[in-house]
Amino acid sequence: RGKRNESSYMVKVAEHIAAIKGVSLQDVAEKTTENAKKLRSEER
């Protein structure tokens, strides 16, 4: 904490999520992309 939220941290965050959940970084990337697309389609 105490650091500014920047998009450059996204990979680090995804790596931590993958480690915690015991899945690959690719799995996290695919799921977060899928979730973002769902959110965008719901906004319309």
Image: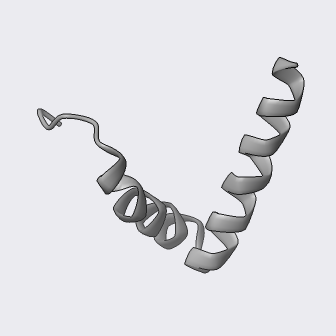
**Quadrant containing the N terminus in the rendered view:** top left
Q: Seen in the image, is 43 located left or right of residue 36?
A: right
Considering every residue shown, the one lying at the far left of the view is 2
| Residue 23 percent across, percent down from the top left | 63, 76
Q: Seen in the image, is 20 located left or right of residue 12?
A: right
Residue depicted at x 78% and y 31%: 39
| Residue 17 percent across, percent down from the top left | 50, 61
The colour scheme used here is one colour
Q: Seen in the image, is 11 located left or right of residue 17?
A: left
Residue depicted at x 82% and y 19%: 43
Q: Is residue 1 above or below residue 43?
A: below
The one of 15 and 34 positioned closer to us in this rendering: 34
Q: Is residue 12 visible?
A: yes
**Quadrant containing the C terminus in the rendered view:** top right
Considering every residue shown, the one lying at the far front of the view is 44
The one of 43 and 10 positioned closer to us in this rendering: 43
Residue depicted at x 40% and y 57%: 13
Q: Is residue 17 above or below residue 5?
A: below
Q: Seen in the image, is 23 located left or right of residue 42?
A: left
